[in-house]
Every structure is written in structure tokens, then in C-alpha cells.
Image (cartoon, helix red, strand yellow):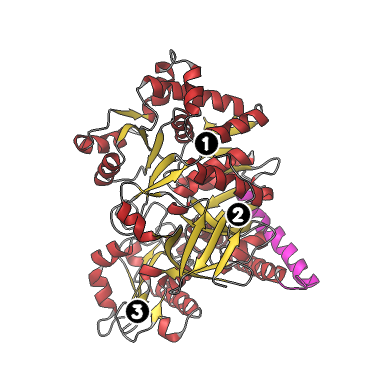
Amino acid sequence: MDESHSPLLVEVDPSDNLNDLLAARVRSTPDRPLVERHVDGQWQPMTAREYDAAIVAAARGLVARGVQPGDRVGIMSRTRYEWSLLDWATWAVGAVPVPLYETSSAEQVAWILTDADVSVLFVETAAHAEVVAEVRAQAPTLRDVLVIDDGAVDDLVAAGADVEEAEIARRRGLAARDDLATIIYTSGTTGRPKGVELTHGNFSQLTTNAVNKLNVVVSSPNARTMLFMPLAHVFARFVHVLTIPAGAVLGHWPDTKTLVEGIGTFRPTFILSVPRVFEKVYNSAEQKAAAAGKGAIFQRAAKTSIVYSRALDTPGGPSPWLRLQHKVADVLVLSKLRKVLGGQVEWAISGGAPLGERLGHFYRGVGLKVLEGYGLTETTAPATVNLPERTKIGTVGPALPGTSLRIAADGEIEIKGIQVFRGYHDNAEATAEVMDDGWFRTGDLGSIDDDGFLRITGRKKEIIVTAGGKNVAPSVLEDRLRGHPLVSQVVVVGDQRPYIGALITLDPEGVPGWLAAHGKPPMSIEEAAKDPDVLASLDKAVERTNKAVSRAESIRRYRILDRDLTIADGYLTPKLSVRRSEVLKDFAADVEALYAEGAR
């Protein structure tokens, strides 16, 4: 199948905007919790009425600060309650929020502030303010820089005390469905970030239709989710809006290093994340079991979980014997993992990169059904997602309502529908390059099966062509190899080379647990990279990875880099995608070493 269409289920009034979406939630359940704030170690609920009042109070402060309809208000912060509050307050005054990653460099900050003409900027910390100060002279439209940690929201509320609420009510009705809601700058793996213009309708139509389609997942009576991904990223932003029509409770957790603690105390019913988080949860659980002398038990339970999940997709389902094995595995291991995740999480939506069939089946066997989806900043996050009643592990699901998919002659995925952006900010040339009569060219490669399920096979710009003329999609190899507990990142190379190679970084969090689980003494990352047992384990991991591809596509040699790839060093985007061009440029000598005579 080369094309697939999913009809729109819910039509949003052309005169409506995101403020109307929130107003409907406040009218329908004014006294039910909408958000929960983490204060002094406790989760404190706020009703929809209370949250709306807080938004109005902040909005009055923005008016007092001189923010006009259409003005650009920047937010540079980790994911936290104030981020969401300021987002809704900005929409309430008819202005346009512009997110900035809290990890942005001074150069990136300067570009976004000037390209978007930001007039007021909220930053989380004094350190962020110092970054802005470096480039403030380059941003002539920037009037105010307000620090959240220094009480910016309280100051805003105090400043707006004399502003009439009627003015907020008036401004809330100014925008229509097709008006600009936000400009999100692509984190991008190459080039300068482009400002993606998304409308009120992109968010409101997509979220209301997604809620209709994912009803049991996101809008059950006790539905709750915790955001920990950066709200500067479109995926988290989509979820933060989605909870409004879903009737779900939203929490925020800024520190991913203590993520398990946050999930355990908030107790979400559904979570949304990128595959790397699911990989780390699995690897951490495996290492803890091994350190406690229960590694073999964990491995058997994990295998049973995967086999059991695969059997669910067969006509006869799991056999009585397999069901019994699964029940034992659940008592010994799987139930404990559910408890770590809060005890009531049943659903997860994964996006940003392929999750991998093995992990998808493992988590479903645990009792956490992972629905893999697909989308980009330009599609307001999801264009496709597996559904509770229609799931195929290994695919990213069928098109969401109001969405059409097609596969171009060269295999590129193209999308048309309610979520497709209106263009790149002040960049008509770049917009024209990716649009074809309403169809957005994604740059990704894939196929659509007879049931309309989309499968991602690679990224068009990243296809490697070996010296022998073999086309290789690196993501297939990278995603599989990155699942090993010792591995943090993988960059497959081989363009115009005689064979495929790989650059590997060891995981600073995973290495100590692996060493302990295998009865080895603590050692540095540098020492681990030369340890015979570590290398033997990586050899086996590469061998297993190569089973997914032909001989010509397989990894023949690999090299361990002397450091991990991080966001701070510019090698990863905030959603943990590798900036391939930067890695290949800075580690060119390591690439050459892969093809030197006598290389490992």
C-alpha cells in the first residue's frame, strides 16, 4: 500500500482557539484536579478552577508588562509547573509562546530571540539569565528577562493586580483556529534551527481527535501522566495540551536523573517518552537483579515476558503452560517492575525513534502496553500511533484521524492533515522545499502495510551507500545495539567505504552495574573500554545485531570512543538524537581507524 487515509472524527469550530479548549475543561469539571504540583516532597492537587485562576493572574501580569496580542514570549526552562502556567497565560493574552531549551548555547539563544522577535523572556535560573546576557545586545526586541527561580511568577501576579479580568476574557477570544499559536525551533541534527509555526488548530484539532481515538489510554476516570521530557520539545508540548480535553491530571518532573522516584510517587496511569528512557529502565532493572544475585531469574522472566507477548499476537494466544510460566515470572520479577513505575501505569506512548520489537514485547509482557507512534515538530508531534485495539509491535501504527499518509517513489514518507504546520518562520524557501501541494515531506523512509500501519525504515539523509553500492539504513543497527546495557550511543558509518563500521560510547550509568553483575571490580570508562570481558560482551552484542541485516549491511568493526555523546557537547539533540554530522567531523580520526589495516 502506498497511501492511507484516516477520516476526521471531531471538527473544531474555525473561530475557536486553545483558550476555548481550556475553558471547556473548566466548565465541565471545575472542581476536579487538573494539575498536581510537587512541593516539599508532596504532590499537591489544583482543581481546574484553581489552575485557570492562576493562569488569569499570570496573564494579567503579562498585560501589565506591556505584552500585546501577537507578541512573542520566550520560555527557557526545564519541565516544571511554571512552564505550563506561563504557556497558557501567554495564550490567554493573545501572544505567542516561543520555547527555548534550557541547554541552549548563547549562539542558539541569540538566533531564536532575534529570529522570533521575542519581547519578554522567562528563564529558569540565574545561570540561564547569564547566557542571555551574553547575547542581549543582539536581540533588539527583548525588553525583559524574568527569572522563575527568583519569583518571576509571583512578581507577575503582583504586577497584574490592577488589570481587569475582563481584558483577559477579551484577549482570550482574539485568536482563531488557523492563527499562530507557537513557534517551535527544531532541535535538528544538522544546520541552524528553523522556526516551525504551529497554529491553534494544529494543537486543538489533533488533541481532541487523539483523545477520541486513544480514549481508554488518556481519558479513563483516573487518568494521570507525568511530564519529564523537555517542554521545549513538541512531543511534551502536545501532551501538555492533550491532558486538557482528555480530562487527565498532569504532573511535572524536571530531573530525569531521579525519574524513577518521580514516577513512583506520582503514580501515572500512562507515560510518554522516547525509547532511550525505556531502554534505561530495562537495563537498570537487569543490573539491579544481577547485583542481588538474581540475574538468571531476571533473564528467564524477561524472556518469558517477551515470548508471552508474542504469543498474544497468534491466533491461539499463549498456551496454558506459557500462561503459568508468565504468572510465575510476574510474581518473581514483573510485578516488582510495575511497582517501581508507580503500580498503576498501564499504557505508554513512545516516539522520537524506533523502540525495537524486543522491548515492545517485554513491556507488554510486564503489563505496560507501549503504543509506538511517529511524528515530527512539523506535524505537531504524532501523525500515527498504535491503538489499544489495533497494535502491531514493530510499527508506528496507523494514521491518526484527520491524517493522510503516502510513500513517495523513493520511499519517503509524506503526511497531510490537521497537524501539518503552516510553514517555517520567515523562511518561504525552506517551506517550499518540504511541501508538495499540502503534503509534508518528512525526510524519513518507510512503508505502509495492507492494514494501514506505517513502518519506519530509516532517514533519507542518513542512508549510507558503501563502496560496493549497498544502501544501508544505520538506524536499524544503531537501535538494536544501543539496547545493550553497556552501550550509551552508537553511530554507524561506512559511506563510500568497503564495509560498515560503528562508533560506540559506553554508558557511564550502565557500566558500574554491569561490572558488579559480572563479578568484576569497579573501573573507569577508559579501563572498561579495554577490558577483555567488556569487549567480549560487545562482540556478542554486535553479532546479535547483525542478525537483523544481510552480510553486506552488517557491522564488521567497531571502535569505542573515549567519551560519551552528550547534549552539552553538542553531539545530541534534546530528544537524544545523534547529531551525526558533528560526530563524524569531530571523531574523523576514529572513523579512519576503523578502516586502517589491522583495526579491531
Residue depth check, mark 3 versus mark 2: number of the one nearer the observer: 2
Q: Nearer the viewer, residue 404 or 581?
A: 404
Residue 335 is one of the magenta-drawn residues: yes
List the residue tagged with mark 2: 401
Q: Amino acid at mark 3?
A: Val
Secondary structure under the numbered disc 2 in the rendered image: loop
Look at label 2 and name its amino acid.
Answer: Pro
- Residue 362 lies left or right of residue 411; in this view the side is right
Q: Find residue 570 and report its horizontal and vertical position in percent.
A: 30, 55
Q: Which residue is mark 1?
A: 17
Residue at image location 50% in from the left, 58% down from the top: 416
Element type at marker 1?
loop
Q: Can residue 106 be found in the magenta stretch?
A: no
Image coords of residue 392 (percent x, y): 63, 66
Which mark, by number, is residue 465? 3
Q: Is residue 126 above or below residue 232?
A: above
Q: Which mark is residue 60?
A: none
Query: Is 511 situated above or below 381?
Result: below
Give the spatial CA distance, label 3 vs label 2.
Answer: 37 Å
Residue 196 percent location from the top left of the image: 39, 48
CA distance separating discs 3 and 1: 47 Å
Q: Residues within 10 Å of mark 1 (few under 14, many from 20)?
A: many
Answer with mark 2 or mark 1, whichever residue precedes in sequence.
Answer: 1
Name the quarter where the N terminus is drawn: bottom right
Q: Is residue 223 visible?
A: yes
Viewer-closest of 205 and 15: 15
Visible in this render: residue 291?
no
Point out the stretch of residues depicted in magenta.
Answer: 314-342
Residue 362 location (% of width, % of height): 61, 64
